[in-house]
Image (spheres, grey):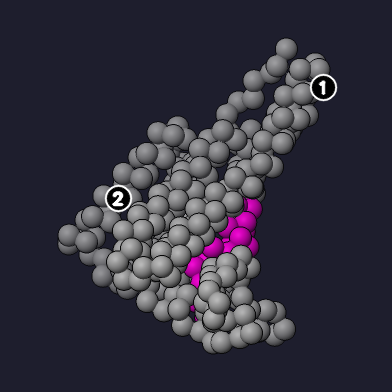
Amino acid sequence: MMHTMQSGIAVVLKAEQVGSVFGFPVTNSLVMTWIVMLLLIMLAYLFSRSLSLVPGKLQAGVEWVIESSLAYMRDVLESEALARRFFPLVASIFIFLAVINELEFFPGVGSIGFMSATGLVPVLRTPSTDLNLTLALAIISFVTIELTGVTVLGFFKYAGRYLNFKSLLGFVVGLLEIVSNLGRLITFSFRLFGNIFAGEVVVLVASYFLPYLLPVPFMGFEMFIGLVQALVFAMLTLFFIKLSIAEPQEAH
């Protein structure tokens, strides 16, 4: 995020606190997260109330997207049951990230707030430019991936992928697997955070030097990037789930 100051603009990585609830700090990114969650819940409720046995164009389109996504997940996971089990998670990740990324340049986001010693403190901040949210989503995906592997393969078989004492090569490969798995937390969170935050900085810098004209193409491109990043996060979760349930191969 960037603050406008008398001497120019300043980049602010940390989400700003705008209040507190029962002693817990409330940041501007958290406020927008709550708003997006409420918006999605309301839209889901209104859409569910409008469902009918004879679908209209909107309902038919949504059903086609759901059926196509389920079919794709079934092909990837090679299981109808697993596809139906993880579809809510993967779909929720994509929809949530897509919405918050597309609202990045919505009027009022990052521009309405109160003045402080450092400049304007916005009330709303794009949640994906807050590392706390991207890391939280990464932890959710990470825990889901690991628990899926344990549930499908069994604890000892899954643990044998990382703790292999049958050979020196198997032991080294196991250590590399552990490092690779822990690295997912970094790649998941920093990929999303870095792309969205960098895009927002580019647009705001462009607005500072040439308002109204220069930022427009950047905003369009960053909205496209926001959709891509939402899809990448969801697809990586799906593919890593697939890898977690694959039968381990012994190294000799």
Q: Which residue is mark 1?
A: 165
What amino acid is at disc 1? Answer: Phe
Q: Position of residue 83 (x, y in %)?
A: 45, 42
Left or right? Give the position of 50 relative to 248: left
- Residue 130: x and y in percent read 58, 64
The numbered mark, 2 or 1, whose residue comes first in the sequence reads 2
Q: Residue at x 41, y 37 (%)?
A: 74
- Which residue corresponds to the image point at 64% horizontal and 47% vertical from the top-left? 186
Q: Nearer the viewer, residue 204 or 61?
A: 204
Q: Which mark is residue 11?
A: none
Which secondary structure class fits the magenta region best? helix
Residue 200 in sight from this viewpoint: no
- 132 magenta-colored: yes
Which residues make up the magenta segment? 123-141
Residue 16 against residue 236 in the figure, above or below: below
Q: Quadrant of residue 48?
A: bottom left
Where in the figure is residue 178, as x and y percent of width and height? 72, 35
Using the image, tell me which numbered label, if any, was put on residue 65. 2
Residue 165 point in image, percent of width and height: 82, 22
Secondary structure at badge 2 equals: helix
Residue type at the position of mark 2: Val
Residue furthest toward the front?
7
Q: Secondary structure at mark 1?
A: loop
Residue neighbourhood size for the residue with mark 1, other residues' Cα within 10 Å, grouped as few (<14), some (14–19), many (≥20): few
Q: Nearer the viewer, residue 203 or 233?
A: 203
